[in-house]
Structures are given as structure tokens and as C-alpha cells.
Amino acid sequence: MNLEDVKVGAKVMIRDLKGKEEVIRRVEAMGLRRGRSVEVLQKLGRTILLKLNNSRIVISKDIARNIYVE
Amino acid sequence: MKSEEKNIKVALVGNPNVGKTSLLNHLAGTTLRVGNWPGVTVEKKEGKTFYNGYTIYFIDLPGIYTLEPLSEDEYIAYRFLTEEPPDMILNVIETPNMERDLFLTAELLELGIPMVLVLNMIDEAQKLGVDVDTERLEELLGLKVVKTNGRTGVGIKDILTAIVETYEKKITPKEIRYSEDLERLLTSLRESVKETKQQLIKKLLAHKEYLHEIERLYGKPAQQVIRENRFAFAHGLYNEVVKRKPITSTDITTLLDRFLLHPYIGTVVFFLIMFILFKVSFDFSKPFMDWLDGFLNDFVSPALGLALIELGMPDLVLRFFSEAVIGGVGFVLTFTPLIAVIYLLLSFLEFTGYLPRIAFLMDRVMHRLGLHGKSLIPLLLGFGCNVPAIVATRTMESKRDKLLVIAMIPFMSCPARLVVFSFFAITFFKNPALVIFSLYILGIVIALITAITLRKTILRGSLEHFVMELPPYRLPTLRLLFGVVWVYLKDFLYRAGTLIFAVSILIWLSMNLPPGVEKPEDSIAGKVGKALIPIFEPIGIKDWRVSTSLIPAFLAREIVLSSMATIYLAEGTKKKEEFSLSESAKEQLFGLLSATKEAFYSLINPLPRTFEVSEEYSNLRSVVSKSMDELSALSFMIFILIYTSCLGTISVMWREAGKKFALGFLIYSFLMAWLSAFIVYKVGSML
């Protein structure tokens, strides 16, 4: 399953990140890494709001599509 | 004692939203200045302080998550740290998100530059049950660690002490140890003891054999292995020094977001906030601007004139000082309250954490236009005044988005244009409201055409993948807000103000030279106006008096009317009125009081007063109606709408986007204005 398909309110664990290297590097530096659990707080338009530890991160759905979770 | 030996250059580095600005405000106070990094529109803040006989210079680097140069911000930070390394890095960490922030710390430690680690927002961390063992952290990294609360300023003194101690005792952090195989390969590349880990890594990444070796050992690309080692370092360190107490506190951010980020309620709240922003910034500052203007022109100017007469100065010199210089200063100052209020309100929205949320909330509408969600604020402000609207684009991170919005703002029709429109529309048309409304729409259409054209040409680049952090809501202190506003206001007065002042003097000179000129017709401006007629004829402006009025109107569009009045009615000089210093001073004081009253009253009045237009120039009306017809009036209004006849706008554009962009835009707007007016005039003539 990828992050785009996760329902609002669900908590998931990140399994793998795919896609463009520079996008991966950016989201990883922001804390979205393999093994982290994230909660989907909200979906709005082409973006998704995530909660990760004590930070809130917005990513567009095209990035979320490349983040595999379980 | 040599002063050079007593300087310490410190760079502030940290993730975005870790409270660097607020710390810097405490550390450097009023010495804080803003500028741009060379050649780019990314903001640079600098300041200094004196401590223990040292002058400590602070340079704020852009907020970044990683030193790998991915975006402009990271590139600036990377280049600064590697090419002109500071004496010390002040690594600011948002303690509640310490593990994430330590990734950047790992990269910074690789540089081998002395470092002081600042655990900021320690109060928030405590509330979340994050407890850091600073002694253990100091011991593991071999550097000084300071706990601070950037809001209240707790721990600021400790930062200075730590900097001086680190400097005097030459404390250098311990080298980070990565995994065994990686370390072995790095060591084998070492040619001198001076080489930093960062240099070794760079060398390793340039060697094909080493890259293959790592891939063979770890089964992954080298880049990824190194990154994972940094993450492992951050993770390990975090677990070693942080004790987490399970605390279930109600999070105010979650609560507020439920409303402010709600697709419907949030949108309503946004427009409400926007309305208040608009109202406070324009209606509240307008009485003060008017008062300032009157104070300078009706009090300071005649008072100075009086003094110069006493000194026996010739008339032209006298008028130069009392009209051009005071007028120029006054013109700059009239923008000051507006700019100050906009900065104050925007900084408030930024520090509270609301601003990035607007980008999230409005993205679904704005991205369809190829624009960033944040661009809605500057664009809406443009209807109030283009100058602060362009200033407001500083909240946009990407240079491309910023330039795109700056190029759109001048087509948002402002009240200065409304004054001109209503004069002409009422004089020439049966249904003035419809004409004015169409002009507003035309402005928006031109803005969109401009944006599309720019996106397809010089500002190409894909709609960026949207990645952004939403910081928790925080209440900024007044001290921080006023500190920041003062810094930006200084910069505005210095950079845009000097340009506005200089050009306004040039324009005055063109109206008043050669010496002894009586009729506007004989002035330089008049001659230029006449010479311009061939250019304006195809758009229906055949009268030199109209084209000449455009020269002083470059200061601001509404001046077109007063200068037309001067030129048409040849009311060259105003009647000299009796001027009494004490009487006038009293009047000004009362004026200020009533301006204050009016400003606060306007806050209660729900309607925006910016759009109220008063009836003036009735004499001019009859004369102008004889020298122009409906079609040429419409053509002239379209020209005034699109051509950026506004010195203030061009000056802030110059400051925010550079000289080339500002001048290029001025020419573009002139061409677009001419072309639109030409089409309307030609089509109209055929009907």
C-alpha cells in the first residue's frame, strides 16, 4: 500500500521510498524515513498532511504515491 | 589590544521554524540588518553584539533540513560553510523534534568547524515530556550545549558565554564515527591530518572504485549508505541523551487546526483574516499617511521656506528645498506607516505559524493557476496598494514563485488608479461603475496572461513537488515583532526610500527647469511630453498636456489629475498663504489627534474605506471633456491601469527582485499598456 491510499486518521509505518532521488533526500531529511510511523491527519486537494513525532508535514500526493507503507 | 583578534564570526544554522530569528533578535537586538545573499533573492540577516571584550558577529543562514545542496537555500548554506567557514557554528535545534534536527547536526559536525549546540524551545519539549541530558550530550559530542527559550530569552546569556568559552579554549567537537567499513575506507583516503570528514566523504564519492567497494559491502549505493549512517548517528545519539516521559497533554495545535485547516470553515476564516489584514493595514494607516503628508507640505515646507527667505536664498533654491526635498522625503514617509503595519501583521501571521497553513489550505485553488498557495495574500493586498503587496512576497520561499507573483501584483488595480478611473469614467461615460469594474477585470486578465507567459518562458520549471512543514502554533512576543518590523523598515527606507527620493527630485527638476520657467509648456517635462506625442497618437492621446501629465504621474498614478489640473488650467503656483509658525504647529497637533481618532474609528467601521473616492477637480472636468472623447478617455484609462506608473512599486520591485527585473517589468508594462490601449482604440474607432 502507498501513503496516498491511507485513510485519514490511520497510523502507518514507512516501508520504502521510491521516486526521484532529490525528492527522497528532501523528505528523508524532514524525517520521513524507513521504519518511521506516521499518522495521516488530513487530505486536501493534491496534498496530504502528516503527523510525524512532534512535527506536521505536508506533501503532495505525487510524493505520497511513492512512499510505501504498512 | 588589537581589535581584529577580538572578533568571533558565528553562523546560525538550523532547520526551518526552529526559532533562529527570535534568538537572533535577542542576541543582536537593534544591530540586526536584513539583506540578500549575493545575486539571489534569499534573505540574509546579520547582527552583532559585544560580550566579554569580544565583538561577536552573527550571520543567519537560511533554514535547511540538510546540507546536501538540493535547493537554493541549501546551496547558499553549503557554499558559505565550505568556502568562507565562520569561526563557529551555532547549531539551533528545535528540541521537540530533536532527532530529526540531529541529522543536520551530523552533517555540520563533518565540517570540523567549532560548534555550540542550542537546544531551543526547551519549554515546549518539557511539556511534551522530552527530557535531554545535556551533560551527556556535551560529553558525547565534545562541545558546549545550551538550553534556551527563544520566546522569553532564557538562556541567551549562556549562548554568549558558551561561544566565548569555545573560542578561548579552542574546543573542537569530537569526530563522528560511522560504521566500521565506511570509516576504514574514509581513513584510507586521508592524506593529511587537517582533512575534515566532509572532505573525505567528498573524495570518496568521487572515486569509482570506492563507490563500487561500498556497493559490494553494503549492497546499496554509497550516497544512501552515508545518509543512513548519518540517520543512525542521529537516532543513536537521541536515544542516548533523551528520556521520554509519556505525557498526554491536549495539543493546542491539533485543536486549532481542526478549525483553521477545515476545508470550509478554514477558508471562511482565511478570508476573514484577510479582510482584517486589509482593513487594518490600509484603513488604519491612511489617516496617519494623510497627516504626515499634510505635516510636511503644510508645515515643514513653509517653515523651511520662511527660514530660507531669512537667509536670502534665490527663489529656485528656496522652492527646491521646500518642494522637491521636503516633497521627496514626504513621499517616502507616506509609505512608512503602511509598510510598518503590513510587516507587523505579516510577521505576526508568520511567527504564529498560520502563514504556511494558508499555503496548504489555498493550494487546491491556486495550483490550478500554477501558483503557490501563499501567493493569494500578496495578490489580494495588491488591491489595497501594490507596494506593500510586493513587500509581502518575502514570505514565499521559492524564487520562481516569488518573481511570478511580483510580476502579477502591479496589475491588481489599486485605489490610486480608482481615483483616476472615477474621474474619467464619470466625465465621459453614462455607466461609470461598469467601466471601472471592467477595468479591474482587465487588470486581473493581464496579470494571468503575464503569469502564463512567464511560466512558459523565463520562469519555466515544473510545479514543484509540494513539501512543507507546518510548525506548531506559537504566540510571538511583541518584542520580537517590533524588533523584526524595525529591521525591515530600516531596510525599506534605505533601499527603496533612497530611490524613491532621488527619482522624485528628478521629476521635480524636470517640471521646474530651465530656471525661471513659468508655463509648464516651456519646462523640460513639457518638451518631453510634446516629443512623446507620436508615441501616444495611435492610442488616441493627441494632446501634449495629457502626455506631459504622465511624467509627474510616474511618482503615483493619482498625480495625473493634479498635474493635469496644473497644466490645463495653468494654475502654476499656488497662492501664497499667510503662514504663522505657532498657529500652524497647533493645527498640526490637532490634526494628529484627529488622525489617530479616525484610524481607530476606521477599525470599527466594517466597510473598507480605502475605496471611497471624493469628488474633486470639477474645473478640470469641463476642460478635459473638451479635449478628449469617450474612446480616447477609455484608452487612457487602460493605459494608466496597465502601465506601472508608480515609483513606489518599481522601487520595491527593484529591492525584492533586482534592478534588471524592475526595469524590464517597467518596459513590459508600458508595452502591454500601449498595445491594449491601441487595440481598444482601433476596434472602438471602427465601430
Image (cartoon, coloured by chain):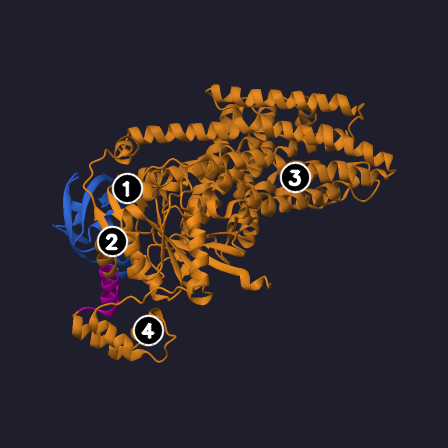
**Badge nearest the viewer, 1 or 3:** 1
Quick one: quadrant of the N terminus of chain B?
Answer: bottom right
Residue placed under numbered mark 3 in the picture:
B550
Looking at the image, tell me whether mark 1 or mark 4 is earlier in sequence order: 1
Residue designated by label 1: B126
From the top left corner, tell me how far across and down residue B498 is, in percent: 64, 46
Viewer can see residue B122:
yes
- Circles 1 and 3 on the same chain: yes
**Residue on which disc 2 sits:** B241
Name the secondary structure under disc 3. Answer: loop
Q: Position of residue B189 (x, y in %)?
A: 30, 78
Q: What segment is highlighted magenta in the picture?
A: B220-232
Residue B506 falls in image quadrant: top right
Mark 3 packing: few (<14 Cα in 10 Å), some, or many (20+)? many
Callout in the foreground (3, 2): 2
Q: Chain drawn blue, letter? A: A
Whole-percent x, y for residue B262 in the image: 27, 32
Query: Residues under labels 3 and 2: Cα distance?
Result: 68 Å
Front: mark 2 or 4: 2
- Helix, strand or loop for disc 2: helix
Q: Point out the frontmost of discs 1 and 4.
A: 1
Disc 2 and disc 4: Cα gap in Å?
A: 28 Å
Q: CA distance from mark 1 to mark 4?
A: 38 Å
Please name whichever residue, B431 or B153, is drawn nearer the observer in this view of the structure.
B153
- Magenta span: chief secondary structure: helix
Q: Is residue B525 above or below residue B261?
A: below
